[in-house]
Image (cartoon, rainbow, N blue to C red):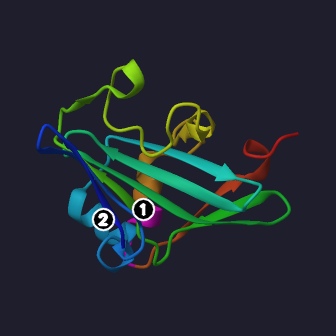
Amino acid sequence: GLTNFSVVNGVVDLIWVLPRGTEVRYTSPQFLKTFGRFEQAWIVVDADYDLFQLLLYYPDKGITALYEGPAVKDNSNYELCLEGVGPELWLWSPGKVFMPDGYQFTGPDFGLGPGGHEELMRTIEAAGFAPDAIIESFGNPSPGCLTTPRDLWEAP
């Protein structure tokens, strides 16, 4: 896969790893077993492309993992599955404060960037999922799927 490095004053500031190849070592069960419970997580279903994204955030470890998988729809729900999918990764020094474009926040922008679709992402709790449901569904050796109502993600 592709790995990018951000270097500031001769020091690696951020490592960004694209998902191609990460499915070998970092499927969701492997990732959750290795790094444990996330501190925060966000999710979005893109109804236009029948995809979903799950972002797991570990600020104390300097890790963010973004998984993308199919959102299979039936009459009223989407089924979200991550079997065999690897994440896009951002790795940085824990506690690092980033200051892109003059505004300050802790952690990278998760590739969403200012004005991107980050406003469409919801915390997993706001989307109706409990952290334990994410861990149970996507953290098992044979990952399961989550179900979410279509009307939560589709425009009326």
Q: Quadrant of residue 4?
A: bottom left
Q: Position of residue 36 (x, y in %)?
A: 25, 56
Q: Position of residue 14 (x, y in %)?
A: 25, 46
Please report the residue visible at 37 percent of the width from the left and 77 percent of the height from the top: 21
Residue at the front extreme? 9
Q: Is residue 151 left or right of residue 143?
A: right
Q: Range of the magenta residues? A: 137-141
Tell me whether the residue at label 1 lies in contact with that at label 2, contact meaning CB atoms closer than 8 angstroms. no
Along the viewing direction, whichever of 153 and 147 lies nearer the viewer? 153
Which residue in the protein does label 1 denote? 136
Q: Amino acid at mark 1?
A: Glu
Q: Is residue 6 left or right of residue 40?
A: left
Q: CA distance from mark 1 to mark 2?
A: 13 Å
Q: Main secondary structure of the magenta part?
A: loop
Q: Is residue 68 left or right of residue 76?
A: left
Q: Is residue 32 above or below residue 12?
A: below
Could you classify mark 2 by the number of other residues whose Cα lies within 10 Å: few (under 14), some (14-19), or many (20 or more)? some
Residue 85 image label = none
Q: Position of residue 43 (x, y in %)?
A: 54, 47
Which residue in the protein does label 2 denote? 31
- Secondary element at image label 1: helix
Please report the residue visible at 77 percent of the width from the left and 52 percent of the height from the top: 150
Q: Amino acid at mark 2?
A: Phe
Q: Earlier in the sequence, mark 1 or mark 2?
A: 2
